[in-house]
C-alpha cells in the first residue's frame, strides 16, 4: 500500500489541497498526518474539516505542539509571532474542532512503521531532530524499523547501520529503497510552512510493498495563502515566510 505522510500543515489550506491532489495522482491509498495541523495560517477550521473527513476514511493523525497549544495554555515557550497566531487560532475553532484536536494521540503505528510529530523518545516534549545524535535517540526509542516525524520543517533522512547513525539528503522525486537490515528515520518536511528556502509544499510517499520512499515538493498558490494571512490580521511575517519558504 502507498502511504502519503504529511506534516506541519499549519492551517495552510492551499498547500494541503495541493499535496493531497498530488498524492492522489501518485497513487496514495491512505494517509498519515504528523501533527501541527493548525497554527500560523489563516484556515484552521477549513483544514480541520478536511482532515476530519480523511480520518473518517481511515487516515491516521497524531498531535503536534501547535495543536496542543491551540487547546489552551499560556504558550510561554513560543516566540511572540507563534503565540499571537495561536491565540488567534483558538478563537477560530468550534467545540467540534477542539474535540477533534484533543482526541489526537501523540504517536501511532502501523505494522513496522511508527509515526510521531517530534522525537519518539519523548514525543510530548516536542524535541527537534536536527542531528545524528538526536536521530539515533529517536530510532532507539521507536518500536519500528521505519519511523516518520516532522516538526523541523526540513526534509531529511537518517539511517542506522553498523552501530552508527548517518544522515542522507534526499532529492525530491527520486525513489529511495529502504533496506530491511537498517533502521530509518524519515523527516517529512512541512506542507504548510517550508523553511529551507523553497516555498513549495513538502510531503513523502512510502510504498510498503516495495519499501520505497519518495520525497516530494509541490508548488501551490502561496500568494493566496499569504494574502489570507494578512487579511486575517495575523502577523505579516507569517505571510512573508510563505513567499520566501523560510
Image (cartoon, helix red, strand yellow):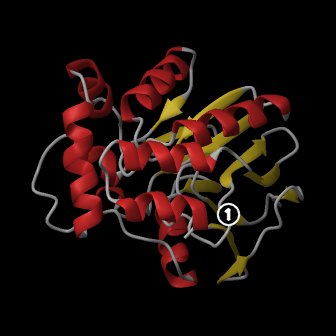
Q: How many numbered tags mark residues here?
A: 1
In the picture, measured across the screen, residue 206 lies left or right of residue 190, that is right
Q: Residue at x 43, y 71 (%)?
A: 128
Q: Position of residue 191 (x, y in %)?
A: 59, 49
Q: Is residue 8 above or below residue 91?
A: below
Q: Position of residue 28 (x, y in %)?
A: 77, 31
Q: Position of residue 85 (x, y in %)?
A: 28, 52
Which one is nearer the viewer's eye here, 2 or 93? 93
Q: Residue at x 82, y 60 (%)?
A: 172
Which one is nearer the viewer's eye here, 214 or 66? 66
Answer few, some or many: residues within 10 Å of disc 1's Cα (few below 14, many 20 plus, some between 14 and 19). many
Q: Residue at x 54, y 82 (%)?
A: 131
Quarter of the image that includes the N terminus: top right
Asked whether residue 184 is in view, the answer is yes
Which one is nearer the viewer's eye here, 10 or 30? 10
Which one is nearer the viewer's eye here, 215 or 179? 215
Q: Which residue is mark 1?
A: 184
In the picture, measured across the screen, residue 46 lies left or right of residue 193, that is left
Give residue 231's quadrant in the image. top left
Q: Is residue 167 above or below residue 122?
A: below
Q: Position of residue 61 (x, y in %)?
A: 47, 35
Quarter of the image that includes the C terminus: bottom right
The residue positioned farthest toward the left in the image shown: 74
Q: Residue at x 63, y 43 (%)?
A: 5
In the picture, measured across the screen, residue 36 lies left or right of residue 184, that is left
Regarding mark 1 in the picture, which secondary structure is present there?
A: strand
Asked whether residue 112 is in view, the answer is no
Amino acid at each position: 500500500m502507498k502511504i502519503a505522510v504529511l506534516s506541519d500543515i499549519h492551517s495552510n489550506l492551499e498547500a494541503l489541497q495541493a499535496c493531497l491532489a498530488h498524492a492522489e495522482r501518485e497513487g496514495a491509498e491512505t494517509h498519515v498526518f504528523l501533527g501541527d495541523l493548525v497554527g500560523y495560517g489563516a484556515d484552521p477550521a477549513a483544514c480541520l474539516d478536511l482532515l476530519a473527513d480523511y480520518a473518517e476514511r481511515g487516515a491516521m493523525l497524531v498531535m503536534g505542539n501547535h495543536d496542543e497549544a491551540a487547546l489552551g495554555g499560556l504558550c510561554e515557550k513560543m516566540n511572540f509571532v507563534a503565540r499571537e497566531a495561536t491565540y488567534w487560532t483558538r478563537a477560530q475553532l468550534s467545540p467540534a474542532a477542539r474535540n477533534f484536536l484533543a482526541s489526537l494521540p501523540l504517536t501511532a503505528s502501523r505494522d513496522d512503521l511508527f509515526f510521531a510529530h517530534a522525537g519518539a523518545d519523548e514525543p510530548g516534549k516536542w524535541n527537534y531532530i536536527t542531528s545524528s545524535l538526536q536521530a539515533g535517540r529517536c530510532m532507539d526509542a521507536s518500536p519500528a524499523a521505519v519511523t516518520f516525524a516532522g516538526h523541523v520543517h526540513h526534509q531529511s533522512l537518517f539511517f542506522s547501520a553498523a552501530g552508527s547513525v548517518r544522515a542522507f539528503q534526499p532529492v525530491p522525486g527520486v525513489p529511495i529503497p529502504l533496506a530491511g537490515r537498517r533502521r530509518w528515520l524519515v523527516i517529512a518536511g512541512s506542507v504548510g510552512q517550508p523553511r529551507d528556502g523553497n516555498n513549495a509544499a513538502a510531503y513523502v510517499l512510502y510504498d510498503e510493498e516495495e519499501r520505497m520512499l519518495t520525497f516530494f515538493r509541490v508548488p501551490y498558490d502561496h500568494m493566496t495563502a499569504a494574502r489570507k494571512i494578512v487579511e486575517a490580521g495575523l502577523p505579516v511575517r507569517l505571510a512573508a515566510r510563505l513567499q520566501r519558504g523560510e
